[in-house]
């Protein structure tokens, strides 16, 4: 269609994440438009604001809950105290999860979406296959209990962050508390936090999935295309590649669970900020580390029988 001089509007995140830069270049040459508001966040307007409203800002960070299925599952695990598999089955029965939920629960869907947002934020193509991606399949009811004890929630966060000129990008479950703007984003809703050097923090919130919100975004693109017949809407996304920084140097706090017998070893290996204990879980030593590099954490982790670990954002 583009090669024949017709504008295209799509919700296909796979297409946009993989070929966005080249399709935008074709549209520019043909003086038509390739529009993809519905590819991220369903009905939430995020592509257009990034491309038009926030261009005066240097984007310092984008963090979002970009997948309604995983957010629904984690929200229900928190309120019901159920295991992952139980809530996943319920989500499938309600139509919130696919029969094959891998793209959602392993974080692949959110990965493609943060690749699109990062490409737009920095004007260069980010390959989603280079983004560190971790899903929610290892989150247990016990992890949720610990989070509740900390007055925290576990969310699958897709993040890109500019740290001293290096852009780090990742998708992973993280613990956040009520001071985080995304803490209250529950169920199938999506939320996206954008931090700019001039604007500060701005939040986008709404229905991130479903036929009607997605249709709303597609139709808005169709209207935009008709308003700009014969004119290309400039989109800053070049084919030049932006390689995400090596995650080994990225610093995080970690919530860690180890068998109780390894308490002393854990104290020797980690600088511990907080010990977490709850009455109905025995035989474990759980704690939050001070901020440390991913590489250093991975090395220390090899010396312990880690039950689970989750990054912490407070």
Image (cartoon, helix red, strand yellow):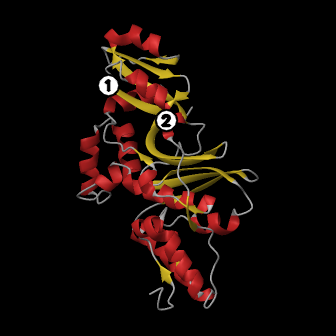
Residue 255, numbered circle: none
**Callout 2: few (<14), some (14-19), or many (20+) C-alpha neighbours within 10 Å?**
few
Residue located beneath label 1 in the image? 307
User: Please, which residue is most extreme toward the front here?
Assistant: 240
Of the 4 image quadrants, the one containing the N terminus is bottom left
Of the 4 image quadrants, the one containing the C terminus is top right
1 or 2: tag closer to the N-terminus: 2
Q: Residue at x 34, y 36 (%)?
A: 139
197 sits to left or right of 298: right
| Number of marks drawn | 2
153 sits to left or right of 261: right
Q: Secondary structure at mark 1?
A: loop
Residue 248, numbered circle: 2
Residue 297 picture location, percent across and down = 46, 26
Residue 82 picture location, percent across and down = 29, 37
52 sits to left or right of 79: right
Q: Residue at x 45, y 50 (%)?
A: 131
32 sits to left or right of 139: right
Residue 243 in sight = yes
Q: CA distance from mark 1 to mark 2?
A: 21 Å
Tell me if label 1 and label 2 are in contact, CB under 8 Å: no
Residue 137 picture location, percent across and down = 31, 41
Residue 151 in sight = no
Say above or below: 83 vs 170.
above
Residue 104 picture location, percent across and down = 35, 54
Say which of 311 and 237 sits in front. 237
**Which label lies toward us, 1 or 2?**
2
Say above or below: 24 vs 239.
below
Q: Residue at x 50, y 73 (%)?
A: 22
Tell me the quarter of the picture where residue 132 sits: top left
Say which of 27 and 255 sits in front. 27
**Callout 1: few (<14), some (14-19), or many (20+) C-alpha neighbours within 10 Å?**
few
């Amino acid at each position: 269609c583009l090669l024949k001089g017709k504008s295209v509007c799509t919700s296909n995140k796979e297409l946009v994440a993989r070929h966005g830069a080249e399709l935008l270049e074709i549209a520019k040459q043909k003086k038509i438009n390739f529009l993809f508001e519905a590819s991220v966040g369903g009905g939430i307007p995020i592509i257009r604001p990034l491309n038009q409203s926030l261009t005066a800002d240097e984007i310092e960070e984008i963090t979002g809950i970009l997948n309604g299925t995983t957010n629904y599952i984690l929200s229900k695990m928190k309120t019901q105290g159920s295991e992952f598999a139980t809530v996943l089955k319920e989500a499938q029965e309600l139509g919130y999860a696919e029969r094959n939920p891998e793209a959602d629960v392993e974080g692949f869907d959110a990965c493609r979406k943060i690749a699109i947002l990062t490409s737009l934020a920095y004007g260069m193509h980010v390959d989603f296959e280079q983004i560190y991606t971790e899903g929610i399949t290892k989150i247990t009811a016990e992890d949720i209990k610990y989070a509740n004890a900390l007055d925290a929630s576990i969310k699958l966060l897709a993040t890109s962050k500019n740290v001293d000129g290096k852009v780090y990008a990742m998708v992973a479950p993280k613990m956040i508390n009520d001071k985080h703007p995304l803490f209250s984003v529950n169920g199938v809703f999506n939320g996206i936090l954008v931090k700019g050097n001039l604007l500060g923090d701005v939040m986008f919130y709404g229905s991130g999935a479903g036929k009607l919100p997605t249709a709303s975004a597609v139709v808005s693109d169709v209207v935009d295309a008709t308003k700009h017949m014969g004119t290309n809407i400039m989109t800053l996304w070049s084919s030049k590649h932006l390689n995400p920084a090596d995650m080994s140097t990225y610093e995080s706090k970690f919530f860690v669970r180890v068998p109780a017998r390894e308490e002393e070893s854990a104290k020797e290996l980690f600088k511990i900020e907080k010990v977490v204990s709850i009455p109905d879980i025995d035989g474990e030593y759980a704690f939050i580390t001070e901020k440390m590099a991913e590489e250093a954490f991975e090395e220390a982790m090899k010396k312990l029988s880690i039950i689970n670990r989750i990054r912490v954002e407070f």
